[in-house]
Image (spheres, rainbow, N blue to C red):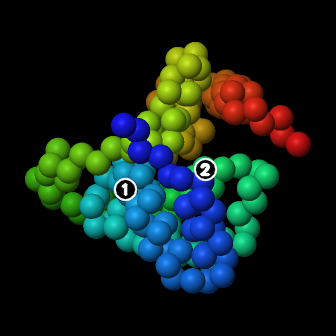
Amino acid sequence: MEKTVNIDVEQRIIHLLKERDQDGIHLLYRHYGALIYGLIYKIVQLEDLAENVMQDTFMKIWQRIETYNASKGKFIGWIIYIARNTAIDAIRSKNFQHHKQTIPVQETLSNHLGYATELNTDYIGIKEVVGKLEAKYADILDLIYFAGFTHAEAAKHLDLPLGTVKSRVRKAIQELRKYFGYDGH
């Protein structure tokens, strides 16, 4: 059976967070913690860093809850956006770049092979929806939104012009908006 978060629970989390009630953080963790951690770990690929980024993500959600606007998108999308950007910021930091150069090969291999936490995109139905897109759009979304690539990095990885990557991202997002019935107003 597919795990979903009850809309009432989601609204309760939002309400509690806006009221600055710490129960909101506890509910957020209980209902979305595994999903958020999976996304973060997939990007940073280091357990300790993923834990720190997750803590930073929860702090940002706590601090920025007033900026969440349900008319602009789903709560889970807003959370994923914050988690993804926090993880990307972490791997682009100078400390991470320095640390990455000094990690022993064995530690890197054991982290990569011994701890495989994947973002469960089925949890929010994204995998199925993105799977309905043409492969050229799905591949780019996977690189940019789930692997943490920049547009330029994705262009290099796919051996495509930067403009093509940006156009495909735009087209993919337009297709997703149509699917979800969002017309942008």
Q: Nearer the viewer, residue 58 or 14?
A: 14
Residue on which disc 2 sits:
77
What is the quadrant of residue 163 in the picture?
top right
**Residue at position x 51%, y 22% in the image:** 131
- 14 vs 48, left or right, is right
Which residue does the image show at 45% across and 58% down from the upper left?
Answer: 32
Residue 97 visible? The answer is no
Disc 2 to disc 1, how far (Cα)?
15 Å
Give the camera-side residue of 169 and 119: 119
Q: Residue 129, image x and y in percent?
A: 56, 27
Residue 145: numbered disc = none
Q: Determine the secondary structure under disc 2.
A: helix
Q: Which residue is mark 1?
A: 34
Name the kind of residue labelled 2 in the image. Answer: Gly
Classed neighbour count for the residue bearing mark 2: other residues with Cα under 10 Å, few (<14), some (14–19), many (≥20):
few
Q: Amino acid at mark 1?
A: Ala
Residue 70, above or below 184 = below
- Position of the N terminus, as image quadrant, is top left
Residue 66 is at least partly visible in this image: yes
